[in-house]
Image (cartoon, helix red, strand yellow):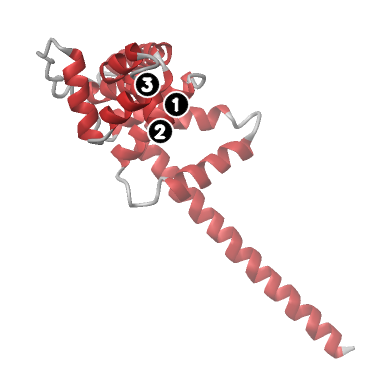
Amino acid sequence: MKLVVITLLLAWSIDAIGQTNSNEMQSQRFMLGWEKLKEVEGEAGEKVINSLKDISPDLGKFIIEYAFGDIYARETLDMKSKEIAVGAALIAMGNAEPQLNVHINGALNTGSTINEIKEVILQMSVYSGFPNSINGINALKDVLSERQKKGIYDDVGKSETQNTTSDRLLLGEKELSALDSTQVEKLKNAYDDFSPELVRDTPSFPMLLIFFLETI
């Protein structure tokens, strides 16, 4: 009987210690995540979490612990790079405008200039189309307007150097060859007989470029 009691007490103690360690670990994840959320997203991120309290507090907790406590706390990428990646993904999705606004704020908070964000949005026209890029630019305008109302004026950054080459085909071939010196020849061999217009337009129009690079 004594042995049974001792065994049960020992099992209870181990379980209690395990629960304590687990709770402590989760608490550390939450606190780390909350600090990262405030660092990156500031007030905008806090509003998102607070908006979930009355409908799904667990979802807010998971966002803080996993997205910010586990992922954002990793150190291989700096915060600026992480926010550029997230912003690009949300622009490409095309159906997450509230979240895009939050992460445009985050990109500005972590060192991106206005022109750098514009370039990311423009790059996404290649991968997800002009409508998503238009929506991205409108989101950027809205975020900048809100920040200016709060007295926050962000760095515009360096302007893009204007292209002075009138021959888009030659310029496109040059840029495509810089990515892969064999691609122009591959395009010609694969499609010149069947559709020379597509071969001509691919180096000068990025959307077709991506399509062909993925299918050759």
Total numbered badges shown on the rendered structure? 3
Q: Which mark is residue 90?
A: 1
Please give the name of the residue rendered at 35% of the width and 39% of the height, measured from the top-left corner: 82
- The kind of residue tagged 1 is Leu
**Disc 3: which residue:** 191
State the mark number for residue 216: none
x, y (%) of residue 13? Answer: 70, 75
Q: Tell me the quadrant of the picture where the N terminus can be found.
A: bottom right
Measuring from the top left, give residue 24's x and y in whole percent. Answer: 55, 60
Residue visible at 24% across and 26% down in the picture = 116
| Nearer to the camera, 95 or 35 | 95
Task: Point out residue 124 in the picture as x, y percentages from the top left corner.
Answer: 36, 22
Q: Residue at x 41, y 16 (%)?
A: 129
SS for callout 1: helix
Please tell me whether mark 3 sits on a helix, a strand or a loop: helix
Give residue 132's quadrant in the image.
top left
Residue matched to label 2: 86
Quadrant of the image for the C terminus? top left
Question: Considering only order in the chain, which callout, 3 or 1, is on the residue closer to the N terminus?
Answer: 1
Circle 1 residues within 10 Å: few <14, some 14–19, many ≥20: many
In the image as oriented, which residue stretches furthest toward the front?
193
Q: Are marks 2 and 3 in contact (CB under 8 Å)?
A: no
Q: CA distance from mark 1 to mark 3?
A: 34 Å
Q: Say whether disc 2 or disc 3 marks the residue closer to the N-terminus.
A: 2
The one nearer the camera, 140 or 180, is 180
Instruction: Name which quarter of the figure residue 185 lies in.
Output: top left
